[in-house]
Image: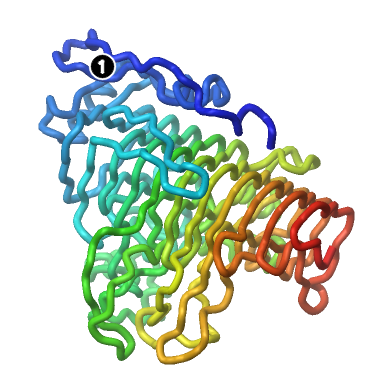
């Protein structure tokens, strides 16, 4: 936790130069990763030619044309599509390809000041259709060396997704239909950067998108998967105006190396009334979505086919759980339900803390809000979960250090109950991994009314280190009935409260 990566922002002079690629406008040609973090991330320092820049305003904001110019002009190493300050409207996804970074006017302000939001406020703003969950998108299994830097994404998600086997090719590309039939992953590419962005108002306003989504997709399904199509009862009835559970602001999947850093996910500033589950004229919860997903949520459909059951995922049957070089750091995330930061990853197979790095983030889960419905159909009860969770891990050898959380559960209307869960940091089985060789250090989850720090219902919880953490009521492990009770070689000290279960 005291390594240089947790140090002060490095001060490097930002240079603006006239690009010598035949363009007349002034564009940034510095390396933003070096500016923020020095030489810490060598792969990101050289992922594209940062001095080869195409000004998208030359193409009137047309991303496809600007991307093609990068590909034809910048050579194999690729370059940057630059959007100057101002508002840029998009009505469809920006389908990013390898060796391209989308960049706005530079803003090196911090996304967070301790537990408070920082001054980061990019002047380049992308506007996407309201409640449609569009944005910067790819499912290319070989997507390498891509990035999104210094964009204010208003209603626009970052969706750098994996390629899933069995989920189908387009049109089986969006949302629930993409992984409904997924059985394995084809790959997720490498070297992906999401740095210095503000992401706000990301939601899909359909709590249960049909599978497939259109009649055209249904015809394709009948042709490709006739047995599945015959067994599928597709409802075309209109659902309530309510968030889809798996809406996610930033989703980055990479087989090797990703950096999701210094992003701010503020509360929505939109106000819209809706009705759901017998409640009328209530606020639409724009922030009831996942915040940052580093390789976990979209694999949910695949887990059941590859892992063999709860806690049985290994590097052999589910290698995508153990991708190397994933880093999520220095982000400020606001939620009104679901999870702030989710991740998977693995290390060297023997040393705690050599896997995915989750460091110096803050998650704020809204306080004193109501959970009217989880599924958009029935009213919530005191037995329901909307997660309301700070941090959720899978994989082995994670380093989770210096993070903070203001974690709160939601109220159930017309009762004295709240939703269940509300963990600060959680590792549980589901169809995922045991808890092996993780290092959780110097995390403080005590800023809200909830926030236990725990391993829960794992078959094996071995050789983990928990040191100097603060949680609400619990730090350590809670075990269920056999076989959820094996634990060996763990070290747990200097936590508040003292460890339980270990």
**Residue 477 x/y as whole percent:** 76, 65
Residue 472, image x, y percentages? 66, 66
Q: Report whether 363 appears left or right of 354.
A: left
Towards the viewer: 114 or 465:
114
- Secondary structure under tag 1 reads helix
Q: Position of residue 346 (x, y in %)?
A: 67, 44
Left-right relation of 248 to 235: right
What color scheme is it? Answer: rainbow
Q: Quadrant of residue 219?
A: bottom left
The image position of residue 273, as x and y in percent, is: 22, 75
* Residue 37 visible in the picture: yes
User: Which quadrant of the view contains residue 80?
Assistant: top left
Check the image and name the residue furthest to the top. Answer: 20
Q: Which residue is mark 1?
A: 73
Residue at horizontal 24 percent and vertical 12 percent from the top: 19
Pick the residue in front: 24 or 59.
24
Residue at 23 percent across and 22 percent down: it is 54
Q: Describe residue 380's horizontal placement relative to residue 309 as left or right.
A: left
Q: Residue at x 35, y 74 (%)?
A: 208
Q: Is residue 459 above or below residue 26?
A: below
Residue sitting nearer the eye, 468 or 59: 468
């Amino acid at each position: 936790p005291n390594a240089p990566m947790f140090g002060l922002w490095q001060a490097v002079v930002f240079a603006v130069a006239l690009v010598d690629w035949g363009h007349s406008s002034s564009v940034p040609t510095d390396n933003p990763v070096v500016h923020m973090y020095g030489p810490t991330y060598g792969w990101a320092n050289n992922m594209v030619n940062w001095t080869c820049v195409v000004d998208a305003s030359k193409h009137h904001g047309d991303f496809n044309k600007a991307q093609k110019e990068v590909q034809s002009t910048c050579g194999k190493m690729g370059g940057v599509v630059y959007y100057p300050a101002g508002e840029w409207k998009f009505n469809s996804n920006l389908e990013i390809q390898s060796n391209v970074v989308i960049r706005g006017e530079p803003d090196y302000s911090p996304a967070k000041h301790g537990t408070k939001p920082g001054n980061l406020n990019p002047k380049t703003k992308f506007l996407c259709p309201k409640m449609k969950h569009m944005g910067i998108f790819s499912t290319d299994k070989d997507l390498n060396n891509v990035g999104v830097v210094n964009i204010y994404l208003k209603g626009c998600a970052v969706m750098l997704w994996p390629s899933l086997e069995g989920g189908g090719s387009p049109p089986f590309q969006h949302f629930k239909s993409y992984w409904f039939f997924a059985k394995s992953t084809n790959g997720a590419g490498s070297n992906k950067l999401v740095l210095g962005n503000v992401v706000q108002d990301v939601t899909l306003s359909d709590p249960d998108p049909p599978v497939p989504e259109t009649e055209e997709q249904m015809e394709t399904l009948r042709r490709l998967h006739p047995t599945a199509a015959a067994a599928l009862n597709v409802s075309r009835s209109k659902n309530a105006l309510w968030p889809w559970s798996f809406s996610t602001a930033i989703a980055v999947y990479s087989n090797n190396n990703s950096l999701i850093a210094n992003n701010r996910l503020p509360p929505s500033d939109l106000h819209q009334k809706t009705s759901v589950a017998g409640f009328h004229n209530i606020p639409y919860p724009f922030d009831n979505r996942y915040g940052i997903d580093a390789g976990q949520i979209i694999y949910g459909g695949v887990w059941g086919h590859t892992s063999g059951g709860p806690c049985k995922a290994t590097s052999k049957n589910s290698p995508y759980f153990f991708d190397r070089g994933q880093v999520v750091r220095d982000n400020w995330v606001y939620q009104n339900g679901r999870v702030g930061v989710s991740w998977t990853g693995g290390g060297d197979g023997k040393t705690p803390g050599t896997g995915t790095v989750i460091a110096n983030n803050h998650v704020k889960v809204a306080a004193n809000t109501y959970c009217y419905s989880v599924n958009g159909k029935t009213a919530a009860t005191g037995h329901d979960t909307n997660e309301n969770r700070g941090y959720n891990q899978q994989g082995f050898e994670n380093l989770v250090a210096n993070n903070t959380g203001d974690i709160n559960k939601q109220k159930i209307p017309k009762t004295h109950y709240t939703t269940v869960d509300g963990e600060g940091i959680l590792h549980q089985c589901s169809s995922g991994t045991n808890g092996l060789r993780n290092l959780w250090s110097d995390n403080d989850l005590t800023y809200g009314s909830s926030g236990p720090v725990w391993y829960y219902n794992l078959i094996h919880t071995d050789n983990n280190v928990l040191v100097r953490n603060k949680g609400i009521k619990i730090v350590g492990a809670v075990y269920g009935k056999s076989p959820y009770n094996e634990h060996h070689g763990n070290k747990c000290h200097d936590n508040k409260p003292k460890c339980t279960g270990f």
